[in-house]
Amino acid sequence: MAAGTVRAPAGRSRFRLRLGAWLLILPLFLFAAGTFVIPIGLMLVRSVQDPDFAAAFPRTAVALAAWDGRDLPPDATARTFLAELQAARGGDRISPAATRLNADLAGFRSLLLRTARNARAVGEDGLGTLAAIDARWAEPGLWAAMRRAAGPLTDYFLLAAIDLQRTDDGSIAAMPETRAVFVDVFIRTLWIGFVVTAFCLVLGYPVAYLIANAPARWANLLLVVVLIPFWTSVLVRTTAWVVLLQRDGLVNGLLRWSGIVEQPLALIYNRTGVLVAMVHVLLPLMILPLYSVMKGIGPSPMRAAMSLGARPLEAFARVYLPQTRAGIAAGALLVYISAIGYYVTPELVGGGGDQMISYFIAFYTNRTLNWGLAAALSLILLLATGLLYLAYARIEVRPEAGK
Amino acid sequence: MAHFSKLAAMALAMAGMAVATAASARDLTVVAWGGSTQAAQKKVYYGPFSSQTGIPVLEDSWSGGVGILRAKVQAGQPNWDVIQVESDELHIGCDEGLYEKPDWAALGGKDAFMKDAVSECGVGSVVWSVALAYDADRLKEGPKSWADFWNVQQFPGKRTMRRGPKYNLEFALMADGVPAADVYKVLRAPGGADRAFAKLEQLKPHIVWWTAGGQPGQLMASGEVSMAASYTSRMFAARRDDKRNFQVVWAGSIYAVDHWVVLRGSPNRDKAMQMVQFMTRPDIQKELPPLSFQGATNLEAAKRTDPSVMSSLPTDPANLAVAAPLDVEFWVDNIEQLTQRFNAWASR
């Protein structure tokens, strides 16, 4: 009884403490949810939604979904479509539908809009009326594309994002070679991210070590040298590399002056330029976490290892390196995840074969309003990143557990 | 569903762009393409408009994309009012209902403007052009046609072209012997794009791709390339400002019209329309071409433009006669698939 009366207020005050803690993070939580989680979630959902055609042509969408997809649809469907086309004329809904159909079949956009402008009163022969406006309406492929867009859910965008499509009979097949581009771009994106991370680690590790072990005033100076570019705009740093790396730029000038090369090297507008610029831009993200970890490592373990007979390299590999693992992990993760989302740098210093997936996400979002495909590409990028992170977290956790 | 996509648009606008401040308290905001062209517009348009009407004007710049405009309109209370858009953004945005419709009678009637400048949703702002250009200080004997642009034996050095299929497929077909007037007919026909890509393939090892309009001039000035497919306005600006000896070959150039639009739901709609009227008046518009080297859309303005710059403008009759207009409908229909194809091709 006595114990109970003591415990109850303690429980209540702990609850109050916890509530206070929750209330403190509530603004951050709401901010993150409102500006980050919900918008991204809503955008990603678009990768499996296909609302645009059905919004403009609701009854046609239902009729097409019921059609077996073989040859041409029943004439009643064509008449429904014509009636809805006239009703949609001049409204805001027909354009998103036209954009959606055009993504599947180039030319569909202008065909649909022109047909809407020219559609007259529907007679007995719906298909005939349409074919009189434009002969392409007699092609079964057109109706199959409309059936694929009937919604409300679709795998069209996700398939397209990995270079697959449904053929007119509903089976899954590869995209034609002239349109199959995304798998290559995904592999390229992940590969560039990997190479950039590796370079950042190799270059950043000694720098971080130097800063962590230098006398205080030198360390501060070095840190500022790392931080100033970090605070400079990515665009500025990228264009600075253009000046340095171009054909008659500083680097080529130096190489030719010193006689190392005769002809200027192609250092920019190709993969070399992308890697150089990205490594430079992302290097601080590797150095800073490494530095913060190295700062906490004293000299004694290394001295002890060497006094016990380890050669310097061995002592480094077996004593120092394992202690910096958390820094390597954080730095590599920061650099890698930043790198695979890169857009501006490859755009400015890359060539035709160096564009990363963000370029396409921006293109479909902003230029062609194909938000479904943009969402599907984003979703795959997010999943790939998530999977890599999980795999990496497993590798990271195992040695800890073994200790 | 519609509600849902509205939510998504709103979310996108929130995530991607600055959260719009209270629209009622906002000044009239005009958005153009930045750089020296916008500086010229400020001098000729925004400043005089403000001082003559007492309406303060805020400036912003963008690099195109109808997606931004859709997100702003769907989110409600757009923070931009008057925007200079390219013709594809005009067409898609007009179909999507993103723009307020101009009153053509108040603008002086449709007949006061060149045909390509008149539309349901916008008023032509300038005529610009993409053409073959070269540095005459480096090439003594200059190229005369796109066939010469492809001729790397006679005209050595790299070339720079805009990264993407637009303009390049047209130029490739012209280099392959298609007359400028027939380029889009060939591109629309089966095998047309194949033919253009095959021709591009011949030049591929010699191409450096540009993405920002300032790059061709830079690349030619630095000696990286000897020729460019470039915006003509940039070439003439470099002649004037940097004393470069850049020459433009107007034969086989492609011209297009940019447009002023007013975003739907703009809280400053009336002021915005007033500003568009001001900027397209002959006595005002005629001052822009000598500064920006882009052509006037108002016929009277074109007539009254300073004759000393006339031959540097896309609207010069001699230059128009050998040029082809950009086929907007072709590109709106085909930009997705041809961009995918271009990227698959460019990375091979």
Image (cartoon, coloured by chain):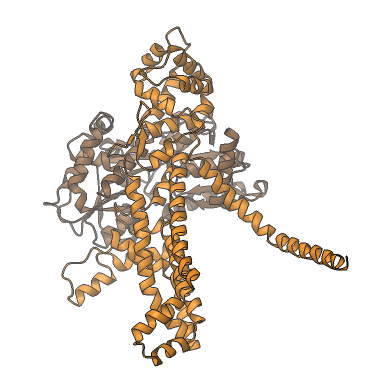
Chain colours: A orange, B brown
- Residue B61: image x %, image y %? 49, 51
Name which residue lies at 52% across and 26% down: A56
- Residue A218: image x %, image y %? 46, 86
Q: Nearer the viewer, residue A53 or A306?
A: A306
Please tell me in which quadrant of the rendered image residue A180 appears.
Answer: top left
Q: Is residue A16 above or below residue B6?
A: below
- Residue A211: image x %, image y %? 45, 82
Relative horizontal placement of residue B30, taking residue B217 as reference (left or right): right
Q: Quadrant of the N terminus of chain A?
A: bottom right
Q: Is residue B221 above or below residue A365?
A: below
Q: Residue furthest left?
A: B153
Please tell me in which quadrant of the rendered image residue B214 appears.
Answer: bottom left
Q: Is residue A327 above or below residue B178?
A: below
Q: Residue furthest bottom?
A: A307
Q: Is any atom of residue B272 visible in this view?
A: no
- Count of picture labels: 0
Name which residue lies at 57% across and 39% down: B74
- Residue A237: image x %, image y %? 40, 66
Q: Is residue B51 above or below residue A400?
A: above
Q: Nearer the viewer, residue A185 or B241?
A: A185
Q: Is any atom of residue A287 visible in this view?
A: yes
Q: Residue furthest top?
A: A124
Q: Nearer the viewer, residue B182 or B297?
A: B182
Q: Nearer the viewer, residue B18 or A71?
A: A71
Please tell me in which quadrant of the rendered image residue A347 appears.
Answer: bottom left
Name which residue lies at 53% across and 30% down: A92
